[in-house]
Amino acid sequence: TILILDFGSQYSHLIARRIREFGVYCEMLPCTQKIKGLQFEPRGVILSGSPYSVYDKDAPRVDPEIFNLGIPILGICYGLQEIAWNHGGSVAPCNNREYGHALMKVDKHQGHPFVDRLFDGIEDSIQVWMSHGDQLDKAPEGFKVIGHTLTAPFSAIAHEEKHLFGIQFHPEVTHTPLGKEILKNFVINICECKTNWTMKSFIDNEIARIQQIIGPNGQVVGAVSGGVDSTVAARLMKEAIGDRFHAILVDNGLMRLNECETVKKNLGDHLGINLKVVDASEIFLDRLKGVTDPEKKRKIIGNTFIEVFESEALKIDQETKETGHCRIEYLLQGTLYPDVIESVSFKGPSATIKTHHNVGGLLEDMKLKLIEPLRELFKDEVRELGKTLKLDDELIWRHPFPGPGIAIRILGEVTPSQVAIVRAADHIYIDEIKKAGLYRKISQAYAALLPVKAVGVMGDKRTYEQVITLRAVETVDFMTADWYSFPYDVLKKISNRIINEVKGVNRVVYDISSKPPATIELE
Ligand code: XMP
């Protein structure tokens, strides 16, 4: 295992991502982690970058015990400065902040085999990506300079006996083309980590871990939505504890066309998951009557969801009393690694963390504990896991769908007739996107309904009907997004079909706003 200590750099999670790609397991913890409290024995440590300067009064500090572990340590950017700071080096603001591409000369040292290992296989100079306002102006004693640029004489340093390495540039970003090789040199050649982290081993370990936590009679409840995260998590629970995992699908009346039937077929029939579908659409739609404020809509849906889910979970608890199983003690959640990283950051949960986890309130009321089998994985790893668990490609590559569903895609009041219009239009839209072979190129697409009417003409008659807006975005992390550049003929077909087939609509528009400043959803 490699331990990554996070000092809050925007690139920290990429370090973890790269190392996993080598098949090496790593864990990322806040930089303030005490070495004494570690649950595992790392073979090496990486110190990340940071928005701080090491000489700031409130600068985050690593537990100095780390330098007594005797294992290799690699400091990246701030991490380099932190190593230097702890070994008597001197760090100062640069005259010119260095940001962007730079050419670094590699300095090799005859007779110092260890310091040279970091740049093994790399010729005299490499392209690197810099992003820093401070730099070393003196190397600490005993350290060799193993790389320099025109402006930064100590771009890379290393200590032969202490096995310490520091680099000013960022090897984890793709702008450092050989960055992967450098990280690989550190993790595999220097730390001698084994490359045995595979999806299969992850599944085996996770199933064993779940079985141990839940015990032979324990029960778990979890909400499923038809999306990839909750389905993969549910499938894993099914493997681990069989029918003692109870999946609940709350039909809030705000799901896509035929969604409930599809989930029933996929999870219940196909995957054999113990699934209960609760039709609560009337309650939801009733409570949404007359409500137009987006935040109010979200709150009503969130609270109603908790209420319905909790009452179903309690029912299951009662029903299974006779079977000799324990009470339901755990709630399954499909939390992914990016959420975990944000919430364990030493700065505390960051402002970007999403508040829309629908099941938040359940923990207090039912006194449930959380079980999160995907908390170590990135989205693409969840997809790979799904593939290994033999889920259908169609399910694995589904676009995300928000918890509040169609309600946040109907601007204004949510009524059954408005829901029906959005459902029908969205179905046609996605169908045509799939037919055009574009579904996987687009990260998320949906149709929404604007609360305005416009005049049109159909046959010889004047119409006065509503406007459908189409959204399609490309994004990596859903934090920023670009609107998708559709071929015009595809848009033409979609618009024709929606206007002809969906009653109540006489116009279709395409949303060409990027995020930021717009968001992906309309509300
Ligand atoms: P925004 O609109 O914030 O959306 O740019 C970013 C991503 O999050 C999804 N989203 C939600 N997902 N519950 C969810 O489960 C929600 O309340 C929610 N709101 C937005 C959105 O679909 C997009 O993928």
Image (cartoon, rainbow, N blue to C red):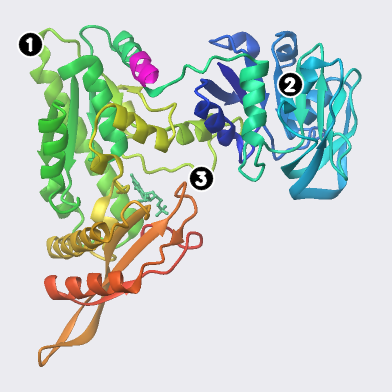
Give, as a three-letter code, the residue at label 1. Glu
Sequence-wise, the earlier of marks 2 and 1 is 2
Position in image of residue 405 (x %, y %):
26, 51
Image point 26% across, 40% down: which residue? Answer: 393
Q: Which residue is mark 1?
A: 322
Q: Where 282 sits versus 215, above or below?
A: below
Residue that badge 2 annotates: 117
Is label 2 in contact with label 1 (beta carbons under 8 Å)?
no
Residue 205 lies in the magenta stretch: yes
Of callouts 2 and 3, which one flags the residue occurring earlier in the amino acid sequence? 2
Question: Circle 3 sits in a helix, a strand or a loop, which is it?
Answer: loop
Quadrant placement of the C terminus:
bottom left
Q: Secondary structure at mark 1?
A: helix
Sequence order check, earlier mark of 3 and 1: 1
Question: Which quarter of the figure has residue 371?
Answer: top left
Give the magenta part as a residue range: 200-206
Q: Is mark 2 within 8 Å of ligand 1?
A: no
User: Type of residue at label 3?
Assistant: Thr
- How far apart, in angstroms, are the residues tagged by discs 2 and 3? 39 Å
Mark 1 surroundings within 10 Å by alpha-carbon count, few (fewer than 14), some (14 through 19), many (20 or more): few
Residue 233 image-quadrant placement: top left
Instruction: Estimate the x, y position of residue 380 in percent, counting from the top left.
Output: 41, 37
The image quadrant that residue 407 belongs to is bottom left
What residue is pinned by disc 3? Answer: 352
- Distance Cα–Cα, label 2 vs label 1: 63 Å
Query: Which label sits in the foreground, 2 or 3?
Result: 2
Q: Nearer the viewer, residue 385 or 448?
A: 385
